[in-house]
Amino acid sequence: MPKILILYYSRTGNTEKMANAVAEGTRANGNVEVDVEYHVDPEDLARYDGIIVGTSTYYHDMPMDMKHLFEEVAVKGVNLKGKTGAAFGSYGWSGEAPKMVLEIMKLKFEMNVTEPALLALNTPDQKSLELCRALGKRVAETLMHTA
Ligand SMILES: Cc1cc2nc3c(=O)[nH]c(=O)nc-3n(C[C@H](O)[C@H](O)[C@H](O)COP(=O)(O)O)c2cc1C
């Protein structure tokens, strides 16, 4: 059964709402195992077939914790090549962080990413949450077809 990680960072709960909706979408068709986490160790990433990262944008950047995680993945040589990746996040006006995450996944770790990153302005509305569910569903279906 494919395993999916939804790893997210959220300070005021906006990206967390998106993460929960993405998780709902991944579970829609049953046959996947899904973990939703706020923190993981670099080695943990190797256990998943799909990695979906949620992050809000602060000061035009991604959170320091997330940078450290990717740095450690690179330093420790954790192999993410060929895994399925996607990114999403809430933003206020520029929303760089999810795009940065997706680029790192694609260009540094050679993951197969779903583009573009999914952004929601501030608190996600029903339409944004529906798009989150669709993203989760899409990633789960991709994995079920390639498993
Ligand atoms: C101090 C501060 C800096 C921020 N910087 C940015 C920014 O550079 N670009 C942006 O798009 N939004 C920025 N925002 C807006 C947040 O990304 C937005 O409030 C988002 O919904 C927070 O999501 P979260 O609750 O998941 O952390 C900033 C907000 C604060 C309070």
Image (tube, rainbow, N blue to C red):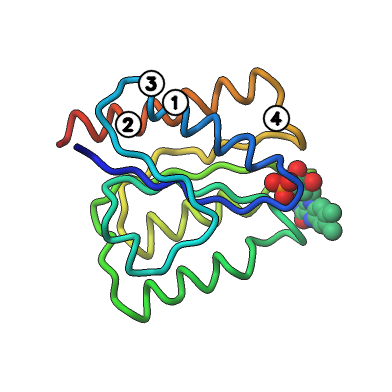
Q: Is residue 138 above or below residue 98?
A: above
Query: Which residue is found at the position 44% from the left and 25% from the top?
Result: 25
Q: Which type of secondary structure does the marked residue at label 4 adopt?
A: loop
Q: In the figure, is residue 58 to the left or right of 136?
A: right
Instruction: Report if the CB atoms under discs 3 and 2 are less than 8 Å apart.
Output: yes
Type of amino acid at the residue the image marks with label 2: Ala
In the shown orientation, is residue 98 left or right of residue 6?
right
State the residue position of label 4.
124
Residue located beneath label 3 in the image: 28
Q: Three-letter amino acid code at disc 4?
A: Pro
Does any atom of ligand 1 lie closer than 8 Å to the CB of label 1?
no
Judge depth for marks 4 and 3 and give the one in front: 3
Q: Amino acid at mark 3?
A: Ala
In the picture, the disc for residue 70 is none
Q: Residue at x 42, y 76 (%)?
A: 72
Q: Which mark is residue 25?
A: 1
Count of marks placed on residues: 4
For disc 2, the neighbor class at 10 Å (few under 14, some 14 to 19, many from 20) is many
Q: Mark 3 or mark 2, which has the lower sequence index? A: 3
How busy is the neighbourhood of tag 4: few (under 14 within 10 Å), some, or many (20 plus)?
many
Quarter containing the N terminus: top left
Residue 93 appears anywhere in the view:
no
The residues bearing labels 4 and 1 have C-alpha atoms spaced at a distance of 15 Å
First of labels 4, 1 by sequence position = 1
Contact, mark 1 vs mark 3 (Cβ under 8 Å): yes
